């Protein structure tokens, strides 16, 4: 059966119409609620579409759709290699080149963190920077390292919530100039610990610090015991010295007054004063003697005067030392 020209023309028209229908149907695309579509014409952004059904020109226009409600989570310092299931726990892998950091007192810590974000401007997120995820990671690393460098090791290990509160606004501020089209919703510090390689040294440092604290407490206690006693002793010695000084000065003043009185009398009558001084001196000496020998003009002993009571005769044959008395 031969096809007539009219039939061939009809078949051609139907083929063309089928191609046009297929071509038209392939240009239909749907933007779901919470998503945003970017329309590119010959590689240039020409339009953005929110939720709805639209048509694009195949081969000429390209559409990229991204969710603006999906919460994206990025891990820092570690990666989840196997998600948790109902029968097994999640498996994680450390990333030391990210996690190892220095604190303000030059101690090494390992930091594991998570930050979450939403895409708020799809065109900026897809085309403003070449690598949005890498840009965010670099910014986050800069902020968290700077934050830890302002903390001591003890603060870094204990104040995770404060670190989160410091890092979140700083992270947002750092991303603003890049116009990356995202909103950082949260920063969570999963863990801050001392790496296993330096844990022994860290424990030694802690033990040394604890011992230092103990010794300081003991020294303070000893100080509180000794210093008050020393101050009391010093005060007593000072009071004794002042009393001795006052007494010595008073005695010296009395002796000076007595000497001046005697000297004045001596000047008035030197002979009488000389004899009185001689008598007073003999009185002070003889007051300590138990026996007294009185000699006559020939050098012989006359009598023994017992100062403790009574007078006894002394034999003439007993030798008696010659007593001499001072003259004028």
Image (cartoon, helix red, strand yellow):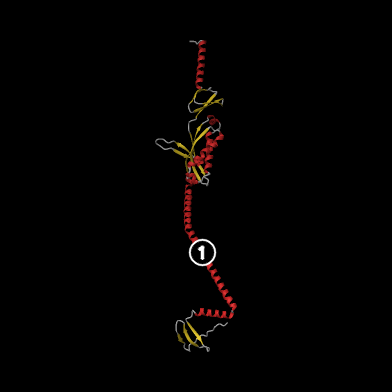
Counting from the top left corner in percent of width and height, residue 317 is at: 48, 89
Helix, strand or loop at label 1? It is helix
Residue 138, picture quadrant: top right
Can you name the residue that lies furthest to the front here? 268
> What is the count of numbered marks?
1
Counting from the top left corner in percent of width and height, residue 24 is at: 51, 20
Position above or below: 28 against 177? above
Counting from the top left corner in percent of width and height, residue 304 is at: 47, 85
Position above or below: 132 against 311? above
- Residue 231 or 176: which is nearer the viewer? 231
Crowding at mark 1 (Cα within 10 Å: few <14, some 14-19, many 20+): few
Can you name the residue that lies furthest to the left here? 87
Counting from the top left corner in percent of width and height, residue 118 is at: 50, 32
- Residue 221 or 8: which is nearer the viewer? 221
Is residue 263 toward the left or the right of residue 83 in the image? right
Res. 193 visible in picture: no
Position above or below: 275 against 233? below
- Residue 159 or 310: which is nearer the viewer? 310
Residue for badge 1: 239
């Amino acid at each position: 059966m031969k096809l007539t020209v009219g039939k061939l023309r009809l078949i051609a028209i139907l083929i063309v119409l089928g191609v046009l229908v297929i071509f038209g149907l392939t240009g239909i695309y749907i933007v779901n609620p919470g998503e945003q579509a970017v329309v590119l014409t010959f590689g240039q952004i020409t339009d953005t579409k929110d939720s709805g059904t639209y048509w694009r020109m195949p081969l000429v226009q390209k559409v990229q759709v991204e969710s603006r409600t999906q919460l994206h989570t990025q891990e820092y310092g570690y990666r989840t290699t196997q998600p948790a299931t109902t029968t097994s726990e999640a498996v994680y892998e450390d990333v030391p080149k990210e996690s190892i950091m220095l604190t303000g007192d030059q101690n090494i810590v390992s930091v594991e963190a998570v930050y979450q974000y939403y895409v708020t401007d799809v065109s900026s997120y897809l085309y403003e920077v070449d690598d949005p995820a890498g840009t965010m990671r670099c910014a986050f690393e800069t902020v968290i390292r700077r934050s830890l460098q302002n903390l001591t090791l003890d603060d870094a290990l204990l104040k995770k919530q404060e670190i989160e509160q410091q890092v979140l606004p700083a992270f947002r501020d750092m991303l603003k100039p890049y116009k990356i089209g995202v909103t950082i919703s949260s920063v969570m510090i999963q863990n801050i610990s001392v790496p296993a390689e330096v844990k022994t040294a860290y424990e030694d440092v802690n033990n040394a610090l604890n011992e230092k604290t103990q010794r300081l407490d003991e020294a303070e206690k000893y100080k509180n015991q000794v210093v008050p006693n020393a101050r009391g002793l010093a005060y007593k010695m000072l009071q004794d010295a002042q009393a001795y000084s006052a007494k010595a000065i008073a005695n010296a003043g009395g002796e000076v007054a007595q000497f001046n009185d005697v000297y004045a009398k001596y000047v008035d009558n030197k002979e009488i004063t000389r004899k009185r001084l001689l008598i007073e001196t003999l009185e002070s000496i003889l007051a300590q003697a138990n026996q007294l020998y009185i000699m006559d003009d020939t050098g012989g002993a006359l009598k023994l005067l017992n100062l403790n009571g009574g007078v006894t005769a002394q034999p003439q044959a007993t030798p008696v030392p010659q007593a001499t008395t001072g003259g004028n």
